[in-house]
Amino acid sequence: MMQRVLVIGCPGAGKSTFARALRECTGLPLHYLDQLWHRPDGTNISPAAFDTALAQLLHNEQWIIDGNYLRTLELRLQRCDSVFLLDYPKDVCLAGAAARIGKPREDLPWVEQEFDPEFRQWIENFSRDQLPEIYTLLGKYRDRVEVTVFHSRAEAEDWLCRWNTAHN
């Protein structure tokens, strides 16, 4: 049974949307790493303050944590029981990130007003720069953590429908 869940993947893939749907299905509390890291003015807390807040969160018995933050992924993998990786094509992620510009979101403490060029480049390089290390870490914990990888939004939606049918 899922009690401590990670939702990871490229920015723009729809991690927060999936995590909210999972929260609705399971009743587990949802926490966004972007809300933990970013201040409403767009600045960040210190890495030490982030680590302290994350450690407190990880001590809870139930949670869904939405966000990559590769630096702390292994720490989260050590405590979770389930991981959902949204490994979607770059064009899907770029379109997803562009579509949320100007919209308030519960997962971010401000409204993005433009598609920041550095953020765009981060998304374009994600499969090269982040994904290999993510898969390596997932492989390290696969024997004790349930890992589900989606390659499209349709796969994620199908999984949610099947889960709802089996548990309601």
Image (cartoon, rainbow, N blue to C red):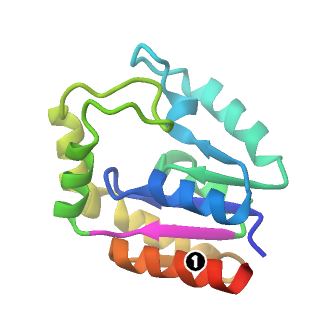
Q: Residue type at mark 1?
A: Val
Task: Give the vertical position of 15 relative to 44 (above or below).
Answer: below
Query: In the figure, is residue 130 to the left or right of 164?
Result: left
Q: Quadrant of residue 102?
A: top left
Residue 105, horizontal then vertical, whole percent: 43, 36
Would you say residue 142 is visible in this rendering? no
Horizontal side of residue 112 vs 9, given as left or right: left
| Quadrant housing residue 157 | bottom left
Tell me what residue is drawn at x 49 percent, y 38 percent: 107
Q: Nearer the viewer, residue 146 or 158?
A: 158
* 97 relative to 15, above or below: above
SS class of the residue under badge 1?
A: strand
46 in magenta: no
* Mark 1 surroundings: few (<14), some (14-19) or many (≥20) residues within 10 A: some
Give the main secondary structure, helix, strand or loop, of the magenta stretch. Answer: strand
Judge from the rendering whether residue 11 lies leftward or rightward of residue 83; answer left or right.
left
**Which residue reaches farthest top?**
41
Total numbered badges shown on the rendered structure:
1
Span highlighted in magenta in the image? 82-88
Q: Could one spot residue 62 in this view of the protein? A: yes
Instruction: Name the residue at 62% across, 26% down.
Output: 48
Position in image of residue 34 (x %, y %): 49, 36
Q: Check the image and report above or below for 73 versus 154.
A: above
Position in image of residue 95 (x %, y %):
19, 53
Quarter of the image that includes the C terminus: bottom right
Compared with 135, 18 (above or below) is above
Q: Please state the horizontal and vertical placement of residue 73, each as a whole percent of the image.
A: 56, 54
Residue beneath disc 1? 147
